[in-house]
Image (spheres, rainbow, N blue to C red):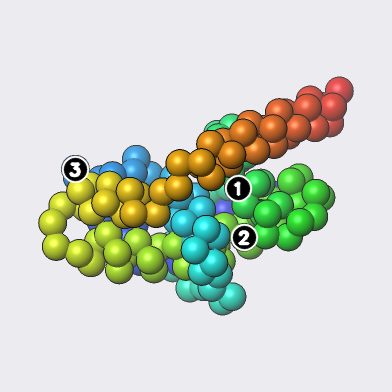
């Protein structure tokens, strides 16, 4: 398991995850969000820059972030083995994270007005309530499966 990994860090990270007006509390959370956006909008960057660095434990030790990372990797590969493979999860996070961060840079940070207001507008524009409810149910099922896998692996 890698101690750290590299990702494409653009102005969206500087604007949305750093400083007193940050919308996200960390670059890690923004990367996971950006990867979700990138996946949803089919914006995979095959060879992203590697000018940012994150400790894998920040994701692995947070149940929600680790479930999202595993879920994205599974959705991307359709291979259940990826759920327990940090390297492949990182590959998915960095590829879709770059695509999503580029969208956020253009559609949130690059727009006039406050980043928070722009983020709210971005989310409203791209929200589908029925699909969101379905995805929450799927995530809960995956979270339960991962919890049972981790429990059985530690026995």
Q: Is residue 61 above or below residue 131?
A: above
Left or right of 18? Residue 139 is right
**Which of marks 3 and 2 precedes in the sequence?**
3
**The C terminus is located in which quarter?**
top right
Q: Secondary structure at mark 2?
A: helix
Dot 1 or dot 2: first in sequence order is 1
Is disc 3 in contact with disc 1, using a CB cutoff of under 8 Å? no
Mark 1 and mark 2 residues within 8 Å of each other at the beta carbon: yes
Residue in view at x 62 percent, y 33 percent: 137
Residue bearing mark 3: 20
Please rate how many residues cluster around mark 1, counting C-alpha atoms within 10 Å: few if below 14, some from 14 to 19, many from 20. many
80 is higher (above) or lower (below) than 9: above
- Numbered disc in front, either 3 or 1: 1
Report which residue position mark 2 lands on: 92
How far apart are the two marked residues, 2 and 3, measured between alpha carbons?
30 Å
Please tell me how crowded label 2 is: few (under 14), some (14-19), or many (20+) other residues with Cα within 10 Å: many
**Label 3 neighbourhood size at 10 Å, few (<14), some (14-19), many (20+)?**
few
Quadrant of res 9: bottom left
- How far apart marks 3 and 1 lie (CA) works out to 27 Å
In the image, 122: left or right of 66?
left
Residue 69 bears which disc, if any?
1
């Amino acid at each position: 398991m890698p101690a750290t990994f590299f990702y494409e860090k653009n102005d969206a990270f500087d604007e949305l995850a750093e400083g007193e007006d940050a919308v996200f509390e960390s670059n890690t959370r923004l990367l996971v969000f950006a990867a979700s956006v990138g996946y949803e909008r089919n914006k995979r960057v095959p060879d992203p820059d590697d000018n940012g660095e994150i400790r894998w434990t920040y994701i692995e030790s947070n149940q929600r972030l680790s479930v999202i990372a595993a879920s994205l990797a599974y959705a991307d590969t359709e291979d259940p083995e990826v759920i327990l493979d940090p390297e492949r999860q990182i590959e998915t996070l960095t590829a879709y994270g770059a695509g999503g961060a580029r969208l956020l840079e253009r559609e949130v940070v690059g727009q006039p007005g406050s980043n928070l207001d722009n983020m709210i507008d971005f989310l409203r524009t791209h929200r589908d309530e029925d699909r969101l409810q379905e995805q929450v149910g799927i995530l809960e099922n995956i979270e339960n499966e991962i919890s049972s896998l981790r429990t059985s692996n530690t026995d």
